Amino acid sequence: MTARHLVLAVVLSACAAACARVDRADLPSDDVALERQLLVMLRAAPPHFRPDVNYAGSYDARTGRDARRRIAEGVASQYDLRIVHSWPMPALGVDCFVMAAPGDDAIARIVDRMSLDPRVESVQAMNVFHVLAHDDPLYSLQPSATLWHLADLHRITTGRRVRVAEVDTGVEMDHPDLLGRVALTRDFVERGAGNAEDHGTAVAGIIAARPDDGVGIAGIAPDASLIALRACWQAGGRGLAAVCSSFTLAKALQFALDERVDVINLSVGGPRDRLLERLLDIALARGITIVGAVDAEVRDGGFPASHRGVLAVAADDAHDIPDNALPGPGRDIPTTITGHKWGFVTGSSFAAAHVTGLVALLRELAPNISPQQMRDTLAPQSVSRTAAGRRVTIDACAAVAAISGTCACACAVAGDTKSPLAH
């Protein structure tokens, strides 16, 4: 190890030691109340209705606002609920109201009763999600640039003109490796630690960090247009641990749909959620590639990774993961963290970030590639295992060569036949 690497490792070790895993005890008291909240969908206004352009979280003054509010207040009054928040979901043709149940009545029983109400399009309990990251001791530097031959790939594609939505915690916009790399940002949490948080910053760096700037790392897709959507917040005020809710994730997904993104990164996991499933189906139907991180502690990989059409990604050293999961680099990954620093991170969150960047590279070459075609391009390279049982990571060179019809990495892989997907 060089002297420069030794100094960097000492600094990064101190930073990594400060991080902690998510725990219910780390949640602020107002976040625990999420367990007493419901999402109530009411049928939306006529097609002329549009949410206001600044997405302030409230309805504009157009005709129907008062009527919608009166219906919601009537529903809340009948079931002894309190309206907490509301948001338009035009992709689904509904207005979503967050309502809190202050009493001791079981949430499931309230949901059952409300589902029979003709005023209610659908209703569900609020679910809580968590990011899929770990803070392990530092090991030797293992740059993805070497594993995936990024210098070779970037001669062919850098993700130019591809719009990538990162649904995560906040991103440190002025990080030296991220300056100018975030095209747009929105905060759908509007509380907590603010816009500079470690998990979102780490994922952003893996996807799109600036290359050739003399510091830090190079992102997988450095010319992609990154849209940072804060739908999760740090637990305990620091570190990689973070949580999200059905409502904050739904707001971010609706925004991503409105922005006509090409790729959505979801490095989060939790229970199946009907509202989010509906939004994901809309996104997939529009040809958006969705990358989800696998929760290795859940048999089917957890949601949203288990949702049909989502590219499920697990760390390449994980065990007992679904057979359809794509493996990506997920241990001891160097990336950006808050405070204008760099650190080593571990977890399927970061494997998913790698694949999101690779998807952006492929979508530059084939803008109209469907989610299924994307899976078919990546999956054949990801099913083998070593003698020790370790999953072999995606062959990025072969994937790029298959799409472009061009030798990607010194012609070590792929033939010369031009792919029908290339343009």
Image (cartoon, rainbow, N blue to C red):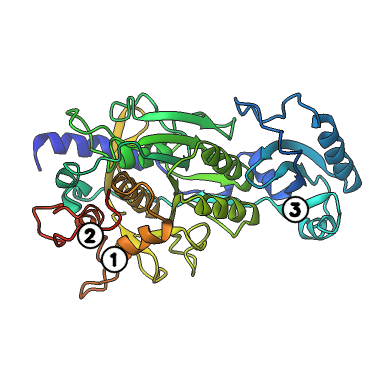
Q: Is residue 362 left or right of residue 255?
A: left
Residue occupied by mark 1: 382
The outermost residue toward the bottom is 387
Residue at point 26% right, 69% down?
Answer: 390
Marks 2 and 3 sit apart, C-alpha to C-alpha, by 43 Å
**Dot label at residue 24:** none
Q: How many marks?
A: 3
| 329 versus 4 height, above or below | below
Residue at point 33% right, 45% down?
Answer: 360
Pointer 3: residues within 10 angstroms few (<14), some, or many (20+)? many
Q: Secondary structure at mark 2?
A: loop
Residue at point 48% right, 60% down?
Answer: 309
| Image spot of residue 253 (x, y percent) | 55, 43
Q: Is residue 223 visible?
A: yes
Compare residues 192 and 229 and report the one nearer the observer. Answer: 229
Q: Is residue 193 visible?
A: no
Q: Secondary structure at mark 3?
A: strand
Residue occupied by mark 3: 123
| 385 versus 192 height, above or below | below
Residue occupied by mark 2: 395
Marks 1 and 2 sit apart, C-alpha to C-alpha, by 7 Å
Residue at point 32% right, 65% down?
Answer: 379
Which of disc 2 and disc 1 is earlier in sequence? 1
Quadrant location of the N terminus in the rendered image: top left
Q: Are marks 1 and 2 in contact (CB under 8 Å)?
A: yes
Which of disc 1 and disc 3 is earlier in sequence? 3
Corner quadrant of residue 213: top left
Marks 3 and 1 sit apart, C-alpha to C-alpha, by 39 Å
| Image spot of residue 157 (x, y percent) | 23, 43
| Image spot of residue 37 (x, y percent) | 73, 47
Q: Are marks 2 and 3 in contact (CB under 8 Å)?
A: no
